[in-house]
Image (tube, rainbow, N blue to C red):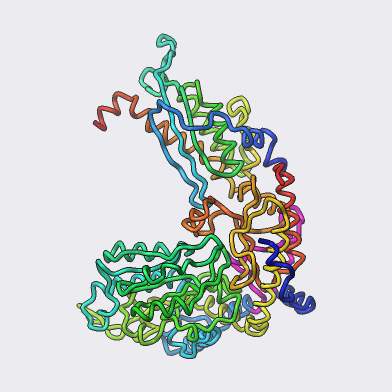
Amino acid sequence: MTDQLTAVPVEAMDRVLLDRIRADFPILQRTVRDGKPLVYLDSGATSQRPVPVIDAEQEYVTGHNAAVHRGAHQLAEEATDFYESARERIAAFVGVGRADELVFTKNATEAINLIAYSLSNATYSDEPDAARFRLGPGDEVVITEMEHHANLVPWQELCRRTGATLRWLGVTDDFRLDLSDIRDVITPRTKVVAFTHQSNVLGTINPVDVLVDAARQVGALTVLDACQSVPHHPVDLVALGVDFAAFSGHKMLGPSGVGALYGRYELLEAMPPFLTGGSMIERVFMGHSTYAAPPARFEAGVPMTSQAVGLGAAVDYLGLVGMTVVADHEAALTGYALQELSAISGIRIIGPSDLVDRGGAVSFLVDGVHAHDVGQILDDAGVQVRVGHHCAWPLHRRFGVAATVRASFALYNTLDEVDALVAAVRDSQRFFGVG
Amino acid sequence: MEKLYQEIILDHYRTPHHQGLRAPFDAEVHHTNPTCGDEVTLRVRLTPGEVDQEVDHHGDDHGDDLLISDVSYEAMGCSISQASTSVLTDLAIGRPLNDVLATVDEFTAMVTSRGKVSGDEDVLGDGIAFAGVAKYPARVKCALLGWMAFKDAAAQTAAQHDPVRKERTG
């Protein structure tokens, strides 16, 4: 397995640039567990925030805060401009030219639930527009075995509500999506194909084109979970041709409490709302209401504003560094981590062993030591990783493991930090008397 | 780290006591730790104890004359959860139910105290080794997995043995 990976194929970021970037993230200067330098390798769960993101939120809150899309006073105008400008920049960051195709949500989980609930609301709607979204017995929703619970449970629930059937594509022994039975799984009965762009556990990047083609041939909608791709690679959602995509602010240097749903306008325009109430309406009478055009239709209530502004600053920051630079740097870190971890006896990587169609989540097992115990030893060395099933329990079951250790990278990580990880993994083997 | 992973814990982890599922049993429960996927299946067998009725002044409490004759389990998890379940079986088997439930409460108080409750070694036996867990909130659930499963199984079993409750629940 290791001979495929003879050398690190891409170069890590220039150290001067990397140090400048690291200086923008105040938290990276702190120590943990009695003075150990922080080695933060859990960006797949949540990323750290640079000063410009923190400043943008502060500037908005201290100078321009008001309820957006309400009121005619100057602050309300400024707040609305901040909010809408963030929408435009975030949309452009993911290749979406029309800002009204981007809906702010509280996170990616809410974005996926928004689609699932809109589809079941369509099932009970008598609006002619809603007909194309209706689901019922005989219809099928297709997901994959490598989904995060956020792109799994909402579809289970949609099927339960509507009587549709949930089906899925499996994962091969070499940690790739199993496309061998795609023609049997994606059929004219399929109404939705929802899949992750990049597995949060395996790091596997899925062939979006193959899945989009298969879905289009049968007229099914596609939903892309882009949480683990958008922060780490250049992503053009329009070019990918998906109907919907969800991503999360806090995984891409932005604040928590804000995420986004991309949807092709033509679809958003025909979809019934999910949450209802203020600001999503067109006209309201005592007995019924009509609804605003997207994206407002899907943004009921006063939205998160400083968070959206912060996310706008986050995409500016990523754009300034350049997503190709980010992707290359993370590939170098991933390649180095795979190489060094594979060299330790008793370590099993749960994910592709090379960098082909693979991102920077490196999950592994230490033979004879439970992931929690590995994580504890790593934590004692200041190395912060995720342990457990990473909200992908069925995927872990697929490989017969209860829990893995996951190191995940972001643009601010260094090769030295990979060395710290590897040294701490060796310590865990020594501590528990294995390897 | 040695404070958390005391030698007693590592010994129980490497050589767990009373492991495996045995019959007969009165109740079986399955508990999981949803944050990490650790699982335990645990069985409890209670028998009416040989407590001398003349010195038993708590006649109205049916738990008092029940003895835990067996606790058996199959578990998948980290060293802390495996070792703490093993320690629990040592403390529980052959002892009166009510005494053991008091021990469970003492253990729970200690590991959830963030270091404020040191725990009584006379009550907790090897369980005292888990005092260090209290400083790691993320590991408290690990230490309690088997103990909470036991408490659940014991409650179900005691209900079967309790003639009053039996009548109530039909």
Whole-percent x and y of residue B63?
A: 40, 24
Whole-percent x and y of residue A150?
A: 45, 65
B170 is higher (above) or lower (below) than B60: below
Q: Residue furthest right?
A: A16
Give the camera-side residue of B52 and A123.
A123
Q: Residue at x 56, y 32 (%)?
A: B86
In the rendered image, residue A48 lying in the magenta stretch gets the answer yes
Q: Quadrant of the N terminus of chain A?
A: bottom right
Q: Residue at x 52, y 51 (%)?
A: A400
Give the camera-side residue of A65 and A12.
A12
Q: How many marks?
A: 0
Q: Residue at x 53, y 75 (%)?
A: A307
A334 is higher (above) or lower (below) than B98: below
Give the camera-side residue of A368 and B148.
A368
Is residue A14 rendered to the left or right of residue A109?
Answer: right
Q: Quadrant of residue A385?
A: bottom right
Q: Residue furthest top?
A: B54
Q: Quadrant of residue A11?
A: bottom right
Is residue A42 rendered to the left or right of residue A75?
Answer: right
**Magenta extent:** A25-52
In the rendered image, residue A162 lying in the magenta stretch gets the answer no
A381 is higher (above) or lower (below) than A415: above
Q: Quadrant of residue A51?
A: bottom right
Give the camera-side residue of A156 and B110.
A156
Q: Is residue B51 visible?
A: yes
Whole-percent x and y of residue B119?
A: 61, 33
Q: Is residue A79 visible?
A: no
B73 is higher (above) or lower (below) than A69: above
Whole-percent x and y of residue A420?
A: 75, 59
